[in-house]
Amino acid sequence: MTIKDIAERCGVSVSTVSRVLNDHPDVSDTVREKVMKVVQEVHYVPNNSARDLVKPQSNTIGLVVRGVGNPFFTEVIRSIENAVGQAGYTMIFHQIASGADELSAGASLVQSKKLRGLILLGGCFDYSEELIAVLQVPFVCCSYTNSFGGLQENMYSSVTINDQKEAYKATELLIKQGHKKIALLLDSKQDHSVSELRYRGYQQALADYGIPLDEELVEETGRFDMASAYEAMRRLAKRRKDFTAVFAIADSMAVAAIKALSDEGWRVPGDCSVIAIDGITMSAYTVPTLTTLVQPAEALGKYSVQILLDMVEKKGDNCHIELETSLREGGSVCQLD
Amino acid sequence: MTIKDIAERCGVSVSTVSRVLNDHPDVSDTVREKVMKVVQEVHYVPNNSARDLVKPQSNTIGLVVRGVGNPFFTEVIRSIENAVGQAGYTMIFHQIASGADELSAGASLVQSKKLRGLILLGGCFDYSEELIAVLQVPFVCCSYTNSFGGLQENMYSSVTINDQKEAYKATELLIKQGHKKIALLLDSKQDHSVSELRYRGYQQALADYGIPLDEELVEETGRFDMASAYEAMRRLAKRRKDFTAVFAIADSMAVAAIKALSDEGWRVPGDCSVIAIDGITMSAYTVPTLTTLVQPAEALGKYSVQILLDMVEKKGDNCHIELETSLREGGSVCQLD
């Protein structure tokens, strides 16, 4: 069945059928309906899709963002989108809640949009071979890796900082300023994710410097949003008066923590120092400026795209890139006398 | 594994499985859970490609975001993506700098990705008939409208607040608190865009209350980013000591302004009140909390998608929706004695 056959059946010209198929506006509704009826009856595959069939690959990359309320991701998304565009690819964008299943969301996108590859921005740290089998295209874990899972290194790619090491550095920085009573603000101690890894780094730093772990100073927000961080910080400040510093595992949590401390009558950093990890634009404008370990947002995005396209185009191997943070010294940490 | 196999395993009909997979509401939670459990066990991925072939049109919508550094847009993007997904469409996402040309970026996406329609988030307010002719699909201006252009109302669609009116309201709120020396922080007085419209609202409010316009209190940032807003506010605070309030035309600018005032030794609101328009999450966590007119981010996104799909699917007419802000009273505005 060709476009000519369709035109004959409908009693219209070939170019009219073409205009209908290409959704041109200059066709009457009556003609459009008549043509579409025949197209559907005969299951006609229009030219462009026929071409897609011959050429099995699109030039489309998917981005699934897990955790829509994370302002740090905004900067990474920008970098990913730039790199995808510069490489001549198009990006399909899909956001899911922080508790949602990024693998099935990704798999569904891959199928329906014939994606060449997938970037997962935020996701679980404990994939298994069975779980990732649904994806069927190369993929890159952006900002996380398989720390709690059973994958072999050659089964997936990742671009991330070392969460445990960076949390160690943040805690150590406070210790070196004389702090011993250091509170920790995190989503959860046992989420098998970024929060748990940063908790480990905090614990390790305390242990290495001979500071006993005080579980009461570890406050879980339960959810990753600023309102929960604010409430958690207020709870902690009401319960305990003896800590002199807080390590919040994300900048957005630290911004909320500074506000909570202020509302409880604490001065930052006079009464309590605050440090975090991320380095979002907004936290450069808190009063005082947040001291934080800045994640290389642009590099995270750029390398994720580079690795993915290398796999997509040149059958490159899976690989793993670990990036470093850089310290942005603000005014939210002070030396303890 | 086909949808029929899944249905057999679950002991339900094929159409029930289909309804679950397509997220239809008319399925009981019990059945949904049962089906999804099997779907996950067998790693079934719905195959939409056959349907896509019969249907000559893509189900893809484009979103061009102009102004990548605008945190307010993050919340609108989330809403757009949700609405597009719920309608069964896919969103192609493209970000451009605030000075770039959204029409040619959009036209290029429409061509290469065979888009059904386009949402422009942020853009110029002065389109002409010739300029929009490149798009060739229905489009919606999200967060702006054709205030400075020559388009007839039936040539385009828009969902936006009334920038001039809302700026009037923000200025009036300060006046009613006794302020007369009110500074204005804006991108540019003459950008034929949001900044110019809000400048007009500010001027109008002053005029209506008999307060002479003092051009020296109107500070242009030149660019829309926090660093430029911070520098502009510091310049103004160094030059003039007599203003008692600032209206910043965007929340992110206001956050930077509060920081700048603090760095210049001004207390907010004691020495200077601050008000803005937007209502981003982050500005609820400044110290003090920013008083701001909250744009209905979710509604902006949702209605943009609704209007667009109505045009795409049902040949609906172009239309225009004007939304209202709501006041979020923070602690950044105080009454002048």
Image (cartoon, coloured by chain):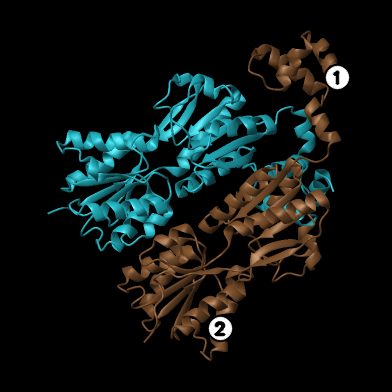
Chain colours: A brown, B cyan
* Pointers 2 and 1 within a single chain: yes
**Label 1 is found on which chain of the structure?**
A
- Callout 2–callout 1 Cβ contact below 8 Å: no
Q: Residues within 10 Å of mark 1 (few under 14, many from 20)?
A: few
Q: Residue at x 45, y 47 (%)?
A: B72
Query: Callout 1, which amino acid?
Result: Thr
The spot of residue B241 in percent (x, y) is 19, 54
- Mark positioned earlier in the residue sequence (2 or 1): 1
Left or right position of A315 against A149: right
**Tag shown at residue A2:** 1
From the top left corner, tell me how far across and down residue B27 is, in percent.
65, 45
Q: What is the CA distance from the residue labelled 2 to the residue labelled 1?
A: 71 Å
SS of the residue under disc 2 = helix
Q: The disc labelled 2 sits on which kind of residue?
A: Ala
Mark 2 — residue?
A205
Q: Quadrant of the N terminus of chain A?
A: top right
